[in-house]
């Protein structure tokens, strides 16, 4: 599969107090026709993350039409699961409202940190979000001893499923291990992990994370970030006929580095959407999106 890289979309450089640096975990929302809103996680001068957005015409995605003046979602109160920052996850329309599944960060001693998954709702089509609950909808468990983060939600047969990043271990040198696991909900609001591994780590890999799932032509398609033990993030791919059992084939649909300075070291955090005859991917560049996020596209025929 050939990707046509369209270049850097946005790099936070102090446009507002919460746009000091980083364009991590971008995700797309179509507002109308060609107008799209791209949400992403950025950091302030104290390194705390919030969720902001820009708006673009998808026909010319490198020209910014609007920048949010304040975050749509900021860190929670002291002591809560998201009191050190919030990170983008995925968007889902349900019962007439727009919901955001997001990740909340809480710091431990030293460099240790924890992540849990929360849920927020928007009543103004994504201009602002309010927490549905002030506690996580998915937390650490017997299957996820360190953290849960980066959810991607889909519906099948009136059941809701979430593929999420499962933190297995973190070590004193700050290296870590995580894979992708599956959670389930009957009502959209209450979730439980099944313990099922969606994409396991291969030999020589340390991290698999940040899934993005679409359904097209009777098949589920999944993109994700993958990090080798010695190396930087790339983007991999898997497919499934039922959403439960996945076949991985990174060479078929993955994305590699290069083409611009912001992604010449690594690519990560894919977000997939379809518009007209193209599959679009938003993704963060090198160093977890420190220099911003970009966009690439490929013909939708590649998924036929």
Image: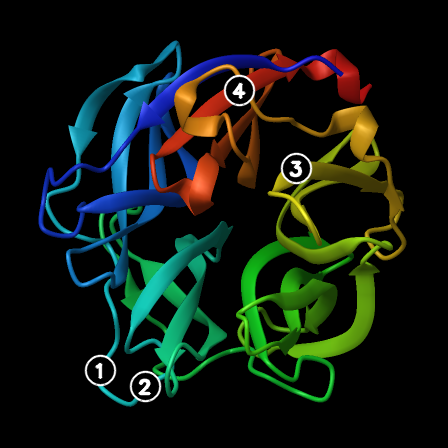
> Earlier along the polypeptide chain: callout 3 or callout 1?
1
Find residue 39 and report its horizontal and vertical position in percent: 35, 42
Question: Hey, which quadrant is residue 44 in on the image?
Answer: bottom left
Position of residue 78 relative to residue 91, above or below, is below
- Residue 304 in the image: above or below residue 174: above
Answer yes or no: do the residues labelled 1 and 2 have beta carbons within 8 Å?
Answer: yes
Q: Which residue is mark 1?
A: 77
Q: Give the spatial CA distance, label 1 vs label 2.
A: 6 Å
N-terminal of the pair, mark 2 or mark 4, is 2
In this rendered view, identify the residue nearer to me: 239 or 190.
239
| Quadrant housing the C terminus | top right
* Residue 235 circle label: 3
Give the label, 3 or 1, closer to the camera.
Answer: 3
Which numbered tag is attached to residue 87? none
Residue 279 falls left or right of residue 55? right
Element assignment for label 4: strand
Which x, y percent locates residue 86?
34, 64
Kindly check if marks 2 and 4 are in contact, taking CB atoms under 8 A apart as contact. Answer: no
Q: Is residue 197 left or right of residue 300?
A: right
For the residue carrying disc 3, how many other residues have a C-alpha within 10 Å: few (<14), some (14-19), or many (20+)? many
Lower position in the chain sequence, tag 1 or tag 4:
1
Residue holding disc 2: 80
């Amino acid at each position: 599969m050939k990707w046509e890289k369209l270049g850097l979309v946005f790099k936070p450089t102090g446009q507002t107090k919460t746009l000091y640096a980083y364009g991590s975990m971008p995700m797309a929302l179509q507002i109308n026709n060609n107008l799209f809103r791209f949400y992403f996680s950025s950091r302030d001068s104290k390194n705390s993350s919030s969720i902001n957005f820009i708006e673009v015409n998808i026909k010319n995605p490198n020209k910014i039409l609007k920048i949010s003046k304040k975050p749509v979602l900021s860190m929670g109160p002291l002591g809560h699961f998201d009191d050190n920052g919030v990170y983008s996850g995925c968007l889902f329309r349900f019962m007439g409202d727009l919901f955001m599944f997001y990740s909340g960060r809480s710091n431990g001693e030293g460099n240790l940190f924890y992540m849990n998954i929360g849920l927020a709702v928007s009543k103004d089509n994504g201009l602002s979000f309010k927490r549905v609950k002030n506690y996580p909808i998915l937390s650490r468990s017997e299957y996820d001893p360190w953290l849960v983060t980066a959810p991607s939600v889909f519906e099948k047969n009136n059941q809701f499923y979430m593929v999420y990043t499962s933190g297995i271990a973190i070590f004193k040198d700050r290296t870590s291990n995580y894979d992708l696991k599956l959670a389930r909900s009957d009502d959209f609001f209450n979730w439980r992990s099944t313990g099922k591994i969606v994409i396991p780590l291969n030999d020589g890999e340390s991290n698999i994370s940040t899934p993005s799932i679409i359904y097209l032509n009777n098949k589920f398609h999944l993109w994700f970030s993958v990090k080798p033990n010695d190396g930087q993030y790339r983007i991999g791919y898997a497919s499934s006929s039922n959403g439960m059992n996945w076949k991985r084939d990174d060479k078929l649909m993955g994305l590699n580095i290069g083409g611009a300075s912001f992604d010449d070291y690594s690519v990560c955090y894919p977000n997939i959407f379809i518009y007209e005859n193209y599959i679009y991917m938003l993704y963060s560049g090198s160093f977890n999106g420190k220099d911003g996020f970009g966009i690439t596209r490929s013909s939708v025929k590649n998924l036929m």
